[in-house]
């Protein structure tokens, strides 16, 4: 029994190489999500990049990072007509970025505690640089949920904010990527993989109906 437990525990800890794979979120629920784990507990700067595909017309959460003191520690949120990024519960709205349904989009968000600006990149185009939260780091045990919006540390999901679609190539860094590095990510050409989360070596847990499938098209 103990041996089995050890075996299960050690299996769960082996990261998977998700190269050429995607997560499919096929259904609106208040449960299905992918939980990502990192031992990092103090981030002075963050870059998160991923690609996603959806035909949802309502709002939804894509990437939700919570710490006990901030449920929206670092959040990517799609509103009906704009994007939002929250850092330590402070929200910036990004208007007028070129977004279409039923297409793969590459998105990156950057933030650093000094000077506290957040910027979104969508398909190679930079947004305005906006102030969110400065001075303090994102601090505490981190829980990341893909496909749901955390309204508590690890839960508090709402089906009307859930993601339905596909997601791939997720990376997270503990520094602000340069525009040159972001361009390499957008073009999917030899970019440096995430040093906090790495799609090619991912520690994760699937909760509910989320599937790992082969990527369907080449990204441009
Ligand atoms: C993941 O798989 C890809 C494609 O097979 C390979 O190029 C890459 O080196 C692998 N990465 C790791 C960290 O195993």
Image (cartoon, grey):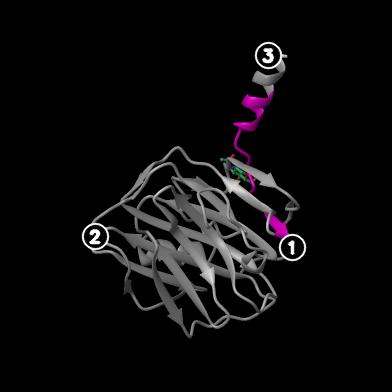
Q: How many marks?
A: 3
Task: State yes or no: residue 40 in magenta.
Answer: no
Which residue was labeled with disc 2? 114
Give the class, few, some or many, for how many residues have Cα within 10 Å of label 3's Cα (few <14, many ≥20): few
Q: Which residue occupies the extreme top position in the image?
A: 2
Quarter of the image that includes the C terminus: bottom right
Q: Quadrant of residue 148?
A: bottom right
- Mark 2 lies on a secondary structure that is loop
Q: Quadrant of residue 40?
A: top left
Q: Please name the residue shown 28% across and 64% down the image.
A: 116
Mark 3 to mark 2: distance in Å?
Answer: 48 Å
- Mark 1 lies on a secondary structure that is loop
Mark 2 to mark 1: distance in Å?
Answer: 39 Å
Mark 3 to mark 1: distance in Å?
Answer: 41 Å
Q: Is residue 45 above or below residue 180?
A: above
Range covered by the magenta-colored residues:
8-29
Which residue was labeled with disc 1? 216
Which residue was labeled with disc 3? 2
Q: Is residue 37 visible?
A: yes
Ligand 1 positioned in quadrant: top right
Decide which of tag 2 and tag 1 comes sooner along the chain: 2
Q: Where is residue 209? Give x, y as percent.
A: 76, 52
Q: Where is residue 210? Give x, y as percent.
A: 73, 53
Decide which of tag 3 and tag 2 comes sooner along the chain: 3
Q: Where is residue 16? Give x, y as percent.
A: 63, 40
């Amino acid at each position: 029994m103990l041996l089995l437990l050890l075996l299960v525990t050690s299996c769960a800890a082996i990261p998977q190489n998700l190269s050429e794979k995607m997560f499919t979120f096929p259904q609106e629920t208040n449960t299905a999500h992918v939980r990502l784990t990192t031992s990092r507990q103090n981030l002075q700067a963050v870059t998160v990049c991923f690609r996603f595909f959806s035909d949802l017309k309502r709002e939804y959460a894509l990437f939700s990072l919570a710490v006990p003191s901030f449920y929206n520690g670092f959040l990517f949120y799609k509103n009906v007509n704009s994007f939002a990024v929250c850092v330590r519960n402070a929200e910036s709205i990004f208007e007028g970025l070129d977004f279409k349904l039923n297409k793969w989009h590459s998105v990156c968000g950057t933030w650093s505690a000094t000077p506290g600006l957040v910027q979104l990149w969508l398909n190679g185009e930079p947004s305005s640089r906006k102030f969110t939260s400065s001075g303090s780091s994102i601090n505490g045990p981190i829980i990341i949920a893909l496909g749901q919006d955390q309204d508590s540390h690890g839960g508090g999901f709402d089906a009307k904010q859930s993601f339905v679609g596909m997601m791939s190539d997720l990376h997270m860094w503990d520094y602000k990527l340069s525009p040159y590095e972001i361009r390499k990510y957008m073009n999917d050409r030899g970019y440096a993989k995430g040093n906090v989360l790495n799609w090619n070596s991912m520690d994760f847990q699937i909760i509910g109906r989320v599937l790992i499938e082969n990527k369907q098209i080449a990204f441009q």
